[in-house]
């Protein structure tokens, strides 16, 4: 069985998954994590992937990021060899480096000259409103600030595609709301294409142009809806709540299926 | 700024949150205060040890020529510190320690890296390295003397065998316990192959490697002292050789004075490794409340 959702536009997609399958293990122990997932993300589009536990959301991001290979099907990402920046639920900052050096590392690995690196780091830290914190160590910052450093480090890759694996899942509600605003601003300023994984349906309705629902074990696309609420949105607005309620109903039906 | 919140939360709220989050961080006590609180228990323990020693001497448990009191020993230590014999011996011993430890470092780092990376080697050598660690270094000397006679090579052989397994184990442990998320993050930002080792795995493994070096030093120093007691080279004086001479001549105060010198050197180097370890953990933010 193959489930497909494509973008209406005819331009080359930023991310294109075509019948992607992922199997872990071999023989009787083999687990089918993703089953024939086809999905396009248009340039500049913000897509949220929603699903219950075991739907292979993180597996899918790893495949797009090139950290893992699909067992079947094709993954294509627009751009050059390093084509998708990945953010995790944890900031995953390097504790032995200062905030500025963390953001600088991707630039250094790309071989940018020192003067240019310094300029870019300052610009990136300003983008996430941490201009004065470059000299600090990650452990000296709060969780939300660390996650912003991680965002700056990912942006330093200059990739057109941003992959986010529940990046705000561990943050308190107020910090999360503010980071939604910040992410939306950066996304539109930089014209990024975002593939954002979350289990928080409201968060998806707040951020996405399109919400895609994945089933669990194996992961398949079972539902997809466009979110046409004008931006900027508020997470506590009635329109966002209505979309969230609709997606939640679908999600509950899917989860209930596993209890029978 | 209240009207702002409807549309988009300004950066004012953000910096306000940041300030609130950071305000909870405590101020560290002064440097002098920390130094004193770390030092006085050591001084007290030392005074206690000297006191007990003096009391044992006063009870007359052993003849004073076999067990002299602290005053006799410390005054002998004072005059010993002025002899060229001590400094010549110290120079030989320090050179052996430095060369032996450096060789152990190279062997240990290379073995550790190879075992950590190559699965077959791990299966073959992993448990052997730990087994080597449990072998008392003095038990190596008969073989070492057969192989290299009474020479410096025999001493180096045992020092390297004593210290390298600890260093290798530190490297293996360090590489094994690099959090997988840091490796994924490193690969995603473009650190692959050798760069992944240079920019992610090596710095992440550093605390465990330093712990391995510290333990390796303790083994190296013990092996070296055992070696210098057993392998006495007549033309070269060393701290260990002088300890042997002092026993042969029944110079008890000198014997204990030399033991104090050995203890102090071991402690000084150990505390240098300890300081390095602490500096790393402070940088990483994993130092606990007590500062340990």
Image (cartoon, coloured by chain):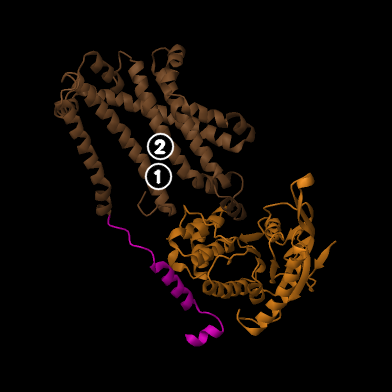
Magenta stretch: residue B11 in it? yes
User: Residue A87, located in which quarter of the rendered image?
Assistant: bottom right
Quarter of the image containing the N terminus of chain A? bottom right
Q: Residue at image x 69%, y 78%?
A: A245
Give yes or no for contact between labels 1 and 2 (Cβ–Cβ under 8 Å).
yes
Q: Main secondary structure of the magenta part?
A: helix
Mark number displayed over residue B277: 1
Drawn side of residue A117 relative to residue B32, left or right: right
Q: x, y (%) of residue B172?
A: 53, 38
Residue B266 makes an appearance in the image: yes
Q: Which chain is brown?
A: B
Provide the secondary structure element on which disc 1 rests: helix
What is the secondary structure assignment of the residue under circle 2?
helix
> Crowding near pointer 1: few (<14 within 10 Å), some, many (20+)?
some
Q: Is residue A106 left or right of residue B59?
A: right
Which chain does the residue under circle 1 lie in?
Answer: B
Q: Which comes before the other along the chain, label 1 or label 2?
A: 2
Label 2 chain ID:
B
Q: Chain A hue?
A: orange
Q: Residue visible at 20% across and 33% down?
A: B52
Q: Is residue B256 left or right of residue A38?
A: left
According to the image, label 2 marks what residue? B214
A115 or B137, which is in the foreground?
Answer: B137
């Amino acid at each position: 069985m193959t489930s497909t959702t494509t973008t209406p536009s005819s331009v080359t997609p930023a991310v294109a998954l075509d019948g992607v399958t992922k199997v872990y293990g071999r023989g009787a122990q083999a687990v089918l994590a993703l089953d024939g997932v086809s999905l396009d993300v248009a340039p500049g589009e913000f897509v949220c992937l929603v699903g219950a536990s075991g739907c292979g959301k993180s597996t899918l991001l790893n495949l797009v990021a090139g950290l893992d290979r699909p067992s079947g099907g094709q993954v294509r990402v627009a751009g050059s060899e390093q084509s998708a920046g990945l953010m995790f639920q944890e900031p995953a900052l390097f504790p032995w480096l200062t905030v500025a050096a963390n953001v600088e590392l991707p630039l250094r690995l790309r071989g940018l000259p020192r003067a240019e690196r310094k300029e870019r780091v300052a610009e990136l830290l300003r983008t996430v409103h941490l201009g004065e914190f470059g000299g600090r160590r990650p452990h000296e910052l709060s969780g939300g600030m660390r996650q912003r450093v991680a965002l700056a480090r990912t942006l330093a890759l200059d990739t057109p595609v941003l992959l986010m694996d529940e990046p705000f899942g561990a943050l308190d509600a107020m910090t999360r709301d503010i980071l939604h605003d910040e992410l939306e601003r950066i996304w539109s300023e930089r014209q990024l294409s975002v593939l954002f994984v979350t289990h928080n349906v409201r968060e998806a309705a707040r951020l996405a142009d399109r919400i895609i629902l994945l089933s669990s074990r194996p992961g398949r696309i079972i539902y997809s809806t466009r979110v046409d609420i004008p931006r900027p949105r508020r997470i506590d607005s009635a329109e966002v709540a209505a979309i969230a309620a609709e997606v939640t109903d679908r999600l509950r039906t899917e989860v209930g299926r596993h209890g029978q | 700024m209240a009207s702002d919140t409807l549309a988009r939360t300004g950066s004012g709220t953000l910096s306000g949150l940041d300030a609130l989050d950071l305000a909870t961080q405590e101020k560290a006590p002064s440097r002098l205060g920390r130094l004193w609180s770390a030092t006085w228990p050591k001084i007290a323990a030392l005074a206690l040890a000297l006191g007990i020693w003096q009391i044992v001497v006063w009870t007359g448990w052993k003849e004073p020529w076999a067990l002299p009191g602290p005053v006799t020993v410390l005054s002998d230590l004072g005059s010993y510190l002025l002899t060229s014999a001590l400094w010549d011996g110290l120079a030989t011993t320090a050179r052996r320690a430095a060369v032996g430890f450096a060789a152990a470092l190279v062997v240990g780092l290379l073995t550790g890296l190879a075992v950590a990376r190559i699965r077959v080697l791990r299966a073959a050598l992993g448990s052997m390295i730990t087994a080597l660690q449990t072998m008392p270094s003095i038990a190596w000397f008969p073989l070492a003397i057969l192989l290299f006679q009474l020479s410096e090579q025999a001493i180096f052989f045992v020092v390297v065998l004593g210290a390298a397994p600890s260093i290798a184990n530190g490297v293996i442990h360090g590489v094994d316990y690099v959090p997988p998320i840091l490796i994924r993050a490193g690969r995603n930002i473009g650190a692959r192959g050798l760069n992944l080792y240079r920019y992610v795995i090596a710095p992440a493994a550093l605390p465990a490697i330093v712990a391995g070096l510290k333990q390796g030093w303790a083994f190296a120093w013990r092996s070296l002292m055992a070696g210098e007691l057993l392998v006495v080279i007549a033309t070269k004086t060393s701290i260990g050789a002088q300890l042997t001479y002092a026993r042969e001549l029944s110079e008890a105060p000198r014997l204990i004075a030399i033991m104090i010198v050995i203890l102090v050197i071991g402690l000084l180097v150990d505390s240098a490794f300890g300081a390095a370890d602490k500096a790393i953990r402070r940088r990483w933010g994993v130092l606990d409340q007590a500062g340990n």
